[in-house]
Image (cartoon, rainbow, N blue to C red):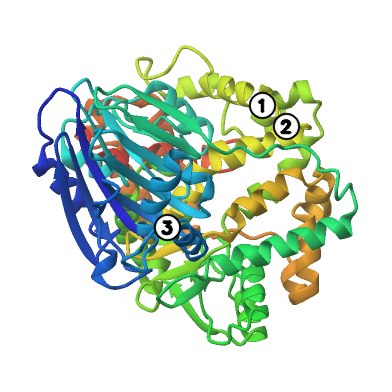
Amino acid sequence: MCGLSGEIRFDGGRPDLAAVERMTDEMEQRGPDGRGLWSQGAVALGHRRLKIIDLSEDGAQPMTDAQLGVTAVFNGCIYNYRELRGRLQGLGHRFYSDSDTEVLLRAYGQWGRECVEHLVGMFAFALVEHRTGRVVLGRDRLGIKPLYLSQDGERLRFASSLPALLAGGGVDTSLDAVALHQYLSWHGTVAAPRTVLSGVRKLPQATVRVIERDGTHHDHCYWQPSYTRRAEFGHDPALWQEAVHDALRTAVRRRTVADVPVGVLLSGGLDSSLIVALLAEEGRSDLATFAMGFESESGEEGDEFPYSDLVARHYSTEHHQFLIPSDRLPAALESAIGAMSEPMVSHDAVAFHLLAEQVAKDVKVVLCGQGADEVFAGYHWYPGIAAAGRADAPDAYAEAYFDRPHEDVTALLHEDAAPDHDASREFVRADMAAPGAESTLDATLRLDVHKLMTDDPVKRVDNMTMAWGLEARVPFLDQELVELAAACPPGLKLAQGGKGVLKDIGRQILPRKVVDRPKGYFPVPAVRHMAEPVLNRVREALTAPEARRRGLFDQDRVAEMLADPAGHRTKRGASTLWQVASLEIWLQTHGIT
């Protein structure tokens, strides 16, 4: 719902207020409804506000509790803030606003860093203790809300977006070789704490970082579900279906908490359609739904309107449909890449950016179905990985999921830019070896949900919607639903081609055509097939003086791809040329030389 920023000095100096102002102003689109700054001693905070809860100025930030001696900036939404407020009032706390930010302040006053264990929602925050100078940073369990960091011996800066840190200045913009390896192995994903820039890191999800006045800090990971079985349900499909259905109802209901209208991004797929159906169960008769499509390209359809129309009619929603002509894509590409905190490969970032632009004209909050495929094993590659023995899981994962093997990554990069080891496979091997995952599928889903998903679909949705002052909420990433899904037997998730337990729920409340349809994606055919306007932009970026000076990619390989754009694909069929170009365009767009 907002953008936050700040600086902490460790050298006895005062924070650079001008830099904090620049960082704050860079995030105006994330929070167009208000702006605030605060400074005391070695710390300064900035905030941009998107008004969702308590629309009055009582909810403005930075917010200070003089009695507790704490100031905070907050991004996100605490869905259980009303329940927590009542509990804290029972413990003697008095409130002066109706905002969830004040609930965070009082919760910190009551429980300290353990306050995060009481919060249900999506959030990133910075809290400053006036007396000690201690700063506490926190991020939600699934990393739905971002928090970027840049630190040297004299100071730490933090912000809700990477471009905001760049606006502050003084960032080491050299490229991180391990992050580049991940980017080229995992479809543009770079796992926390890394980014493609050596001088910028991300606070990992489910983490609280306590920073002392002298710059020392310690991290506390406060949540990690166990991917092992629960005895109470056994392997009974009916019991699991009932439990997941109840948890999903709760997850959707929680995400309607707002003092502004709430809509749904309705693709017509199972996940978003379930959200609409559950809201209808709750008696929502005035629900606004939104769908987008693109012109066809190379024989590939660019919309799923028949399915979204079917769901909208079935539940009598106030449906909005947008068809985007291909000639809008070049300008849309530029805008979408400008909105990216990190370079992204998934071409549906463009779709989300264009859709958010339209949706923000009608509502400030939307629910969407992101995360269901990772949480409930919906992708087509999961069965093949699951069939591997536990010891062979990392190799099976790499074979099914990676864009290319290590030797092909190094062949794409200039020799000075490539790491000398298979960094991406080592990351997967270490994560899968950790205790707490019973089967190969358990280890795979734990890796995807808690390490990789945050920095692809989740980040993509946050970046593209917040670029228009639109808050997206993701019911399938509710903490209790994720905990339940983690314990669900793999066979129930893999059944019926994936997401079996969700499909069984869907058959009770959705039109059968929606449940039994082939799995769809958010297609942008002109990008996928490198239509002429897109290819022209790609060629321009990869042959620009900045690209040649950077020398990031092997120039012979780049020339080969430009000569035959359709002939170079990843193992899963995506365009290698687009993967390479999107990184270079992002670097140029953000002035990184």
As helix, strand or loop, the secondary structure at mark 1 comes to helix
Q: Position of residue 52 (x, y in %)?
A: 37, 69
Q: Position of residue 327 (x, y in %)?
A: 35, 66
Q: Quote the CA–CA distance across marks 2 and 3.
A: 42 Å
Q: Position of residue 587 (x, y in %)?
A: 28, 38
Choose the circle earlier in sequence order: 1 or 2: 1
User: Of residues 287 and 503, which is closer to you in this image?
Assistant: 287
Instruction: Give the mark toward the camera: 1 or 2.
Output: 2
Is residue 8 visible from the viewing direction of this image? yes
Residue 110 relative to residue 368: left or right: left
Is residue 349 visible from the viewing direction of this image? no
In this rendering, the answer to whether 558 lies above or below 328 is above
- Looking at the rendering, which quadrant does residue 166 occupy? top left
What residue do we see at 89% from left, 48% from top? 235
Task: Report the residue marked by disc 1.
Answer: 432
Mark 2 crowdedness (10 Å alpha carbons): few <14, some 14-19, many ≥20: many
Q: Position of residue 224 (x, y in %)?
A: 61, 37
Q: Residue furthest top?
A: 420
As helix, strand or loop, the secondary structure at mark 2 comes to loop
Q: Residue furthest front?
A: 92
Task: Report the residue marked by disc 3.
Answer: 92
Image quadrant where one finds the C terminus: top left
Task: Report the residue marked by disc 2.
Answer: 437
Q: Quote the CA–CA distance across marks 1 and 2.
A: 8 Å
